[in-house]
């Protein structure tokens, strides 16, 4: 039955791991929290039930770029009734969508957008069959100190009490599951696939200086195949891309300040292998459907195993042998410390607010949002718990650069998963070799990366 529906609406003969179980749980009428590995096709898990039942879907998504990309992908697949509405649209564009809102089957927006009362009033009367929380780990990781609107998502889930809630993500800890159930005020039927991707090998390299790291990187990318290189900032994104381009390799950049046309151009060229190397911030990857990424390189490590495993999982979606390479210098610790401690709201801010001190407008507004949900003492406890969890995750990643035991086992233990792999595992297990898949030099002229970028866009 489900296979026939899958073939009818998507043209696939079989489900990917975890999809069928998730879809069946949804069709059985449950609120569903599904943890599926990166690249497992989470969007299909709510789209197929919507097509079968004819139900309308509200998808709450963390990034404008992710919303836009998913809508474009759906339209390319023939879906005409999908729309993303967000702050990047003009007033006229938003008003046009609002006027026609009830005619769309799939509506994407951010938690910040729908929380605003002048926006929410347009959604209130719509009979949504499903409320989808895409990248649901954001509710826990961002929902208290960084993007408090996520902590108030129950305003939506409680208003649409008769709508099923579908939470989808690639990585989740026990704490995150508890957070999501508390924030949404729903009890979920939970389906969890193993996070381990056996076709991805782990390699880590420590260097004394950034110069050594750059030298290694420029030599290594000669044979990494289609590659994503993750860096911590937009500035470094441009610097590194320029350096790689000067070595003769066509290189794309991707970060949050690119407009839609720029993002789409880079994504399309990368997916089509017109360019083999992307230098990106963490904004790149969510919703990008490229199956043959052979290598993910972390020039800068992320601050948690959850983020690391999510980004690593963008390699090898086709099941072929792939690799995750991480690079580290002592100087990187300063960058990681800064990122790990960049809290939107902390205990000191709450104390100052409670004592009547004037804080900046955004912080004050966010604290007021959270106080709608929690009394001040409980909010302090929540914020402290978040900071403790982030500190634990950060220290876990700091230890990753030093361990001499199995890297795969170490990462999976963070998610309470035990794995063992006897071949193609990691550098510490001495059973994994770096991939040798040549990237051909294509840059003939001596031009700057900026000139090349201008030519593309």
Image (cartoon, rainbow, N blue to C red):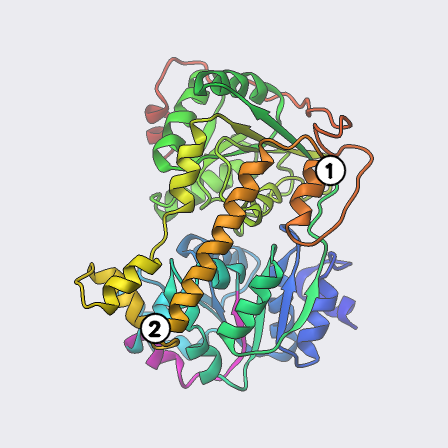
Q: Could you tell me if the residues under marks 2 and 1 are in contact, i.e. CB atoms within 8 Å?
A: no
Depth order, front residue of 452/59: 59
Residue 120 percent across, percent down from the top left: 35, 77
Residue at disc 2, secondary structure: helix
Residue 36 percent across, percent down from the top left: 66, 57
Number of numbered discs on residues: 2
Residue 88 visible in the displayed image: no
* Region of the chain picked out in magenta, as a range: 118-133
Instruction: Choose top left, top right, bottom left or bottom right for residue 435.
Output: top right
User: Which of marks 1 and 2 precedes in the sequence?
Assistant: 1
Residue 162 percent across, percent down from the top left: 54, 86
Q: Residue at x 59, y 36 (%)?
A: 400
Residue at disc 1, secondary structure: loop
On the rendered image, what quadrant is the N terminus found in?
bottom right
On the rendered image, what quadrant is the C terminus found in?
top left
Query: Viewed as shown, does residue 56 lie left or right of 316?
Result: left
| Residue 291: image tag | none
For the residues carrying marks 2 and 1, which lies nearer the camera in this image? 2
Between the residue at mark 2 and the residue at mark 1, the CA separation in whole angstroms equals: 51 Å
209 over 136 or under it: above or below: above
Query: Viewed as shown, does residue 42 lie left or right of 99?
Result: right
Q: Which residue in the structure is indicated by mark 2?
A: 376
Instruction: Choose top left, top right, bottom left or bottom right for residue 320.
Output: top right
Other-residue count near label 2 (Cα within 10 Å), few / some / many at <14 / 14–19 / ≥20? some
Instruction: Choose top left, top right, bottom left or bottom right for residue 265.
Output: top left
Q: Which residue in the structure is indicated by mark 1?
A: 320
């Amino acid at each position: 039955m489900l296979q026939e529906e899958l073939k009818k609406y998507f043209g696939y003969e079989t489900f990917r791991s975890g999809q069928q179980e998730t879809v069946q749980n949804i069709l059985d009428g449950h609120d569903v929290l599904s943890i599926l590995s990166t690249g497992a096709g989470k969007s299909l898990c709510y789209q197929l039930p919507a097509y079968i039942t004819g139900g309308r879907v509200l998808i709450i998504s963390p990034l404008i770029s992710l919303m836009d990309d998913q809508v474009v992908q759906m339209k390319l697949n023939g879906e005409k009734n999908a729309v993303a509405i967000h702050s990047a649209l003009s007033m006229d564009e938003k008003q046009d969508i609002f006027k026609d809102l009830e005619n769309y089957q799939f509506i994407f927006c951010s938690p910040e957008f729908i929380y605003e009362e002048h926006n929410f009033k347009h959604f209130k009367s719509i009979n949504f069959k499903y409320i989808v929380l895409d990248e649901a780990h954001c509710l826990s990781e961002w929902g208290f100190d960084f993007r408090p609107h996520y902590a108030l998502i129950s305003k939506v889930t409680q208003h649409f009490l008769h709508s099923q809630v579908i939470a989808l993500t690639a990585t989740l800890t026990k704490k995150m599951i508890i957070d999501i159930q508390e924030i949404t005020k729903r009890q979920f039927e939970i389906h969890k696939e193993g996070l381990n991707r056996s076709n991805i090998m782990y390699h880590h390299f420590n260097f004394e200086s950034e110069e050594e790291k750059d030298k290694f990187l420029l030599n290594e990318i000669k044979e990494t195949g289609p590659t994503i290189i993750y860096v911590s900032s937009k500035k470094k994104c441009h610097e590194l891309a320029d350096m790689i381009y000067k070595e003769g390799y066509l290189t794309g950049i991707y970060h949050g300040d690119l407009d839609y046309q720029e993002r789409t151009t880079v994504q399309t060229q990368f997916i089509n292998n017109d360019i083999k190397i992307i230098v990106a911030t963490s904004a790149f990857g969510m919703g990008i459907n490229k199956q043959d990424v052979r290598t993910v390189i972390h020039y800068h490590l992320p601050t948690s195993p959850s983020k690391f495993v999510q980004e690593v999982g963008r390699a090898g979606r086709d099941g072929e042998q792939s690799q995750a390479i991480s690079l580290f210098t002592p100087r990187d610790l300063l960058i990681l410390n800064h990122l790990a401690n960049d809290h939107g709201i902390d205990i000191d801010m709450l104390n100052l607010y409670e004592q009547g001190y004037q804080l900046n407008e955004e912080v004050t507004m966010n604290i007021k949002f959270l106080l709608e949900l929690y009394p001040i003492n409980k909010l302090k406890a929540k914020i402290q718990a978040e900071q403790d969890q982030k500190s634990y995750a950060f220290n876990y990643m700091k230890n990753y650069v030093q361990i001499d035991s199995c890297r795969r086992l170490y990462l999976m233990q963070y998610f309470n998963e035990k794995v063992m792999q006897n071949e193609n595992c990691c550098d510490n297990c001495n059973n994994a070799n770096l991939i040798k898949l040549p990237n051909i030099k294509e840059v003939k002229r001596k031009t700057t990366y900026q000139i090349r970028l201008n030519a593309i866009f």
